[in-house]
Structures are given as structure tokens and as C-alpha cells.
Amino acid sequence: MRTRRRYLAVQLYSKGELPTESNFRNTIWQQLQELYGELGVSRIGFWLIAYHLDSQTAILRCQHDQVRPLRAALATIQSSNSTPLIFQVVGISGTIRKAVSLLPDLDPHTVIHPRKHR
């Protein structure tokens, strides 16, 4: 049976410079582990699909029944590398294409489809 997933289209706000992709991913991972532990993180199935500094947007993936825990973790993140950071979930979708369309500043051609690069 195919795994059902949800994609969160996220707008980022920061007074300073946004973190690098690896720092951004690590910040979310650390917060998820702090809130839910390793078993909880594995159930959530978090994955960073796209992160764009120029448009200050990101697309995150999780299991279809784990959207609320991921949103809760995002809401509790206050900074990344001492830079204040706020997440606004613009929308939730069942496909990457729809998640990209929810972010008007994001160029759809810059998002890499995960199945094409296995």
C-alpha cells in the first residue's frame, strides 16, 4: 500500500538573514526530537522538499496523519542560529504541485520532484 503524505507550504519571516538549508532542516529536526523523541519523529516522517532563500518559502513533507504535530513543532520554533524566525503555514496539500501553487513567489521549475532523483 502506498504511503499517504501531506505537503506543507510555508512562508518564513525573519528580521535577520535566513538560515542555510542545512541549519533550517536541523532546527526543525531538533525541535521535533525535543517535543516527540526519536519514535515520534520517525512517525511524523518529516522531510524538507524545497527551501528557497530568495522567496523565503519552504515545502515540508510529513505523514498524512501527522500534520498537527509538525505544525505544533513549527509554532514552537523561535529562532535558528540566534536569528528570530517565524513560520506561517500557507496551506496543506496532498501533492507537491499543489503545494507549489500555494506559494505565489515560488518558481515551480526550481522544485525538484523527489521520485525523479532516487
Image (spheres, grey):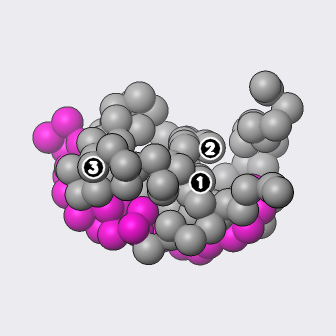
Mark 1 crowd level (few <14, some 14–19, many ≥20, 10 Å Cα): many
Report, in whole angstroms, how far the alpha carbon at label 2 lies from the one at label 1.
Answer: 7 Å
The part of the image, by quadrant, that contains residue 30 is top left
Which element carries disc 2, helix, strand or loop?
strand
- Rounded to the nearest angstrom, the CA distance separating label 3 from label 2 is 22 Å
Residue 57 seen in the current view? no
Residue 37 disc label:
3
Label disc, if present, on residue 49 of the rendered structure: 2
Residue 9: image tag: none
Q: Position of residue 43 (x, y in %)?
A: 48, 55
Question: Taking 81 as reference, is 71 above or below it?
Answer: below
Q: Position of residue 65 (x, y in %)?
A: 56, 71
| First-in-chain label (3 vs 1) | 3
Number of the label disc, if any, that sits on residue 61: 1
Which amino acid lies under the numbered mark 1 shown in the image of this protein?
Arg
Label 2 Cα neighbours within 10 Å, binned few <14 / some 14-19 / many ≥20: some
Specify the segment rendered in magenta: 69-96
Q: Residue 93, how many percent across, how many down?
A: 69, 70
Dot 2 amino acid type: Ile
